[in-house]
């Protein structure tokens, strides 16, 4: 039998036995199979055969209400139904033939090698708290995971987003968890919010530092002025305690003042009130 050389011819050949659709983009070739597995409101099955230098069955099942072990078993079951098609393709398809021009091939290769960054989503079976008493149980949860790499290697659920959003996700450990069926958060907006918050915090701390420096400067100037006034009054013959009080009751107080306060047996407030 002559080898099949195009993806469309292969889809037509398999279409006699299965509901298939040819898909080709960025140098990738796939045959999507409709009608395999279950597709309901709570479960989605996607099945295709990936064609590179050989054929390989790929099955993705999205079903948050079921554990990962059950999902894995169902994926293997669907792959089993596709095995005969994989064998047929590996035997009769010419993987070395392409109908695209060299310019298209090179352009697709360039696009595939383009570096991208963003996030993708995936479901994992993890232990989480299920009530207010902290009881733990295994549940399926959706994760938003940071990704940086080539466009060709990006996961199917990859979503590009801003440098700020990517950096914010990295700061949070590279991934966040969201509740089942909850909408995906707007990570760009969330990153912008935290960027504004951090900027406001920096401005607040800078203002507090300026106020602290100004307060310390004013306090130092008042202290220097009080000491100068005290020394002037003493030089003019004023009583030491009276000069200390007139100078603003500088602290730490001189030894003479401390001794007088101890001798009085009063607290500082009452002691200062007795100085005339």
Image (spheres, helix red, strand yellow):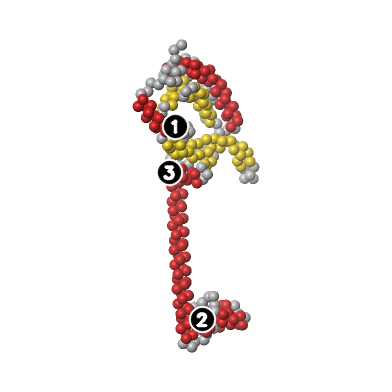
- Residue 22: where, in percent of width, then height? 43, 22
Separation (CA) of disc 3 from disc 2? 62 Å
Query: In terms of image quadrants, where is residue 189?
Result: top left
Q: Residues within 10 Å of mark 1 (few under 14, many from 20)?
A: some
Separation (CA) of disc 3 from disc 1? 20 Å
Lateral position of residue 88 relative to residue 114, left or right: right
Dot 2 or dot 1: first in sequence order is 1
Tell me the residue that label 1 is attached to.
Answer: 152
Q: Residue at x 54, y 25 (%)?
A: 38
Q: Residues within 10 Å of mark 2 (few under 14, many from 20)?
A: many
Circle number at residue 244: 2
Mark 3 and mark 1 in contact? Answer it, CB < 8 Å. no
Q: Secondary structure at mark 1?
A: loop
- Residue 274: where, in percent of width, then height? 56, 83
Q: Is residue 32 visible?
A: no
Can you name the residue that lies furthest to the bottom here? 237
User: Which one is in front, 190 or 240?
Assistant: 240
Separation (CA) of disc 2 from disc 1? 81 Å
Look at discs 2 and 1 and give the one toward the viewer.
1
Q: Secondary structure at mark 2?
A: helix
Q: Residue at x 53, y 31 (%)?
A: 62
Q: Residue at x 48, y 33 (%)?
A: 155
Circle number at residue 163: 3
- Residue 154: where, in percent of width, then height? 46, 34
Q: Secondary structure at mark 3?
A: helix
In the rendered image, the vertical position of residue 137 relative to residue 213, given as above or below: above
Query: In terms of image quadrants, where is residue 140?
Result: top right
């Amino acid at each position: 039998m002559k080898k099949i050389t195009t993806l469309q011819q292969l889809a037509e050949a398999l279409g006699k036995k299965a509901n298939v659709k040819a898909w080709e983009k960025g140098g990738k070739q796939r045959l999507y199979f409709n009608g395999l597995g279950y597709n309901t409101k709570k479960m989605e099955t996607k099945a295709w055969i990936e064609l590179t230098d050989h054929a390989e069955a790929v099955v993705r099942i999205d079903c948050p209400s079921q554990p990962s072990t059950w999902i894995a078993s169902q994926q293997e079951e669907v792959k089993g139904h596709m095995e005969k098609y994989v064998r047929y393709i590996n035997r009769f398809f010419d993987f070395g033939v392409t109908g695209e021009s060299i310019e298209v091939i090179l352009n697709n290769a360039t696009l595939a090698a383009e570096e991208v960054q963003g996030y993708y989503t995936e479901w994992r079976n993890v232990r989480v708290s299920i009530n207010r008493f902290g009881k733990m149980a295994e549940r399926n949860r959706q994760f938003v995971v940071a990704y940086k790499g080539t466009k060709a290697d990006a996961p199917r659920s990859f979503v590009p987003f801003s440098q700020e959003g990517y950096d914010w996700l990295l700061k949070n450990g590279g991934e966040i968890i969201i509740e089942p069926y909850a909408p995906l958060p707007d990570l760009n907006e969330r990153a912008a919010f935290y960027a504004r918050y951090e900027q406001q915090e920096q401005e607040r701390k800078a203002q507090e530092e300026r106020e602290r420096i100004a307060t310390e400067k004013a306090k130092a100037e008042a202290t220097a002025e009080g000491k100068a006034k005290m020394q002037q009054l003493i030089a003019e013959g004023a009583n030491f305690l009276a000069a200390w009080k007139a100078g603003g009751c500088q602290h730490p107080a001189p030894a003479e003042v401390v001794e007088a306060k101890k001798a009085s047996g009063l607290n500082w407030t009452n002691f200062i009130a007795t100085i005339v």
